[in-house]
Image (cartoon, rainbow, N blue to C red):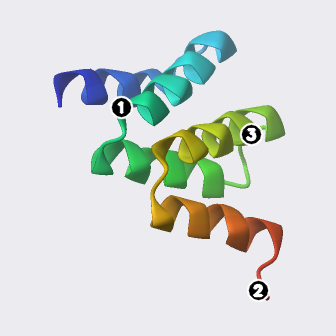
Amino acid sequence: PEVEAELVALLDDRDRDVREGALIGLGLLRTPGAQKALLARFADAKRMTRERAFAAASLGLLGSASALGALLDAIDPAA
């Protein structure tokens, strides 16, 4: 939980590389809190496409059905 909180805090770092590293780190954690943070970042249309792509890749790392559902909905909302 401590690592998770630190990674979530790094999502707002000024350095893009730090934010992207935090996104990947959250995907590797595979915790419910990490998934929540990744889903929020992925769904935030104000974020740069690259950052949202890192969030999507990290959601794939989680391997959870709900994360997969969010990714599939983004590709084809009618499916």
In-front residue for pair 13/18: 18
In-front residue for pair 32/7: 32
Q: Is residue 40 above or below residue 25?
A: below
- Amino acid type for the residue under numbered disc 1: Leu
Circle 2 crowding by C-alpha within 10 Å: few under 14, some 14–19, many from 20:
few
Say which residue appears at 71% left-offset and 42% top-offset.
52
Where does the image place residue 53, in percent across and percent down from the top left? 74, 39
Q: Quadrant of residue 19?
A: top right
Residue 19 in view of the camera: yes
Badge 3 element: helix
Circle 1 crowding by C-alpha within 10 Å: few under 14, some 14–19, many from 20:
some
Dots 1 and 2: beta carbons under 8 Å? no
Which residue in the structure is indicated by mark 2? Answer: 79
Where does the image place residue 77, in percent across and percent down from the top left? 76, 80
Which residue in the structure is indicated by mark 3? Answer: 53
Badge 1 element: helix
Q: Quadrant of residue 72?
A: bottom right
Left or right of 64? Residue 78 is right
Say which residue appears at 67% left-offset and 16% top-offset.
16
Query: Mark 1 and mark 2: span between their CA atoms?
Result: 29 Å
Quarter of the figure with the N terminus: top left
Q: First in sequence, mark 2 or 3: give its number.
A: 3
Dots 3 and 1: beta carbons under 8 Å? no
Which residue in the structure is indicated by mark 1? Answer: 29
Left or right of 63? Residue 36 is left
Left or right of 31? Residue 45 is right
Camera-nearest label, 3 or 1:
1
Quarter of the figure with the C terminus: bottom right
Q: First in sequence, mark 1 or 2: give its number.
A: 1
Camera-nearest label, 2 or 3:
2
In-front residue for pair 5/14: 5
Where does the image place residue 14, in percent across and percent down from the top left? 59, 15
